[in-house]
Amino acid sequence: MVFPVHALAHRPLTARAVAELVGLSAASCVSDDFDAVDAEVRRRGWSWEEHLVCESFRTAEQHVLCSDGVSPFGDPDGRVFLVFGELYPVDPHDEKMANGPWLYGLMDRWQEQPGWSGRRSCTGQDCETVLTQAAQAVTAHLGTPPERMVPSSPAMANGPALTHRIWRTPTHALILGPAADNGPYGYLTHLQLSCTPLACGPDLPAADDEDGLTDWITTHVDW
């Protein structure tokens, strides 16, 4: 069965955006002081974002960036998440589409951002295509294909089972795939690239340890 999706919005991920994300932990440290963070945000051509995802940033490439702390700059122990897609999955328990009108409005808000595009309706394969294109950008920056490709678990995010891809640097895990929505709504699903310290969890489990891999991914990407 091809799992249907009510709506999909995305802004293509680029190798430059991946490089900026990966480089945040090694950037000059900026304290959590609001004025200091604001100055760095403006220097980078970013802006503050309060509507799509609460207390986040909008990067110069119009992706949404979230972090554990107020400042994502120069913290090797911090976790950062770059949202480049948003999908409104079909809820089989919502037969009357009770959530449809207001969730479509939220999807419109994502789609209307500069450089973003959207479609209604679509399938899980359409979302998978967006992830595949994003993976090419990560590979272009890191110079290596993903180390692991793992089907997502329903416990990770609403919607169709999509692919999680994992890369590792000497210090960080990069995980590309669907993630639970942490915006002001709770029913949608992010398509995101996470850059989190390897120390967030134990070593990467064996390829045949599906439950272990699911737990490992969740530990690194759950906000």
Image (cartoon, rainbow, N blue to C red):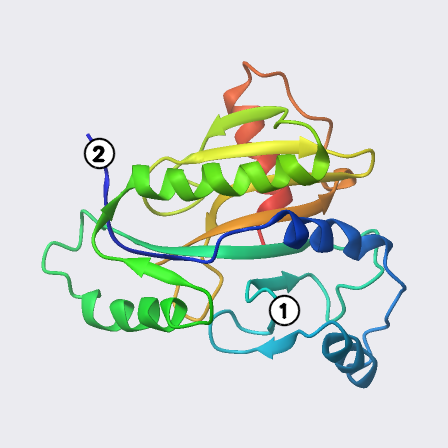
Instruction: Determine the residue positioned at 66% across, 74% down.
Output: 46
Residue 69, position in %: x, y?
Answer: 73, 66
* Residue in front for this viewpoint, 171 or 119: 119
Residue 147, position in %: x, y?
Answer: 63, 24
Q: Which quadrant: the N terminus?
A: top left
Secondary structure found at label 2: loop
- Asked where in the image residue 102 lies, by quadrant, the reply is bottom left
Up the image or down, 131 lies above or below 207; here it is below
Of the image marks 2 and 1, the number of the one nearer the N terminus: 2
Up the image or down, 108 lies above or below 83; here it is below
Q: Residue furthest left?
A: 96
Amino acid of disc 1: Ala
* Residue in front for this viewpoint, 66 or 118: 118
Disc number for residue 60: 1
Instruction: Determine the residue positioned at 68% across, 25% down.
Output: 204
Q: Which quadrant: the C terminus?
A: bottom right
Amino acid of disc 2: Val
Secondary structure found at label 1: loop
- Asked where in the image residue 38 lies, by quadrant, the reply is bottom right
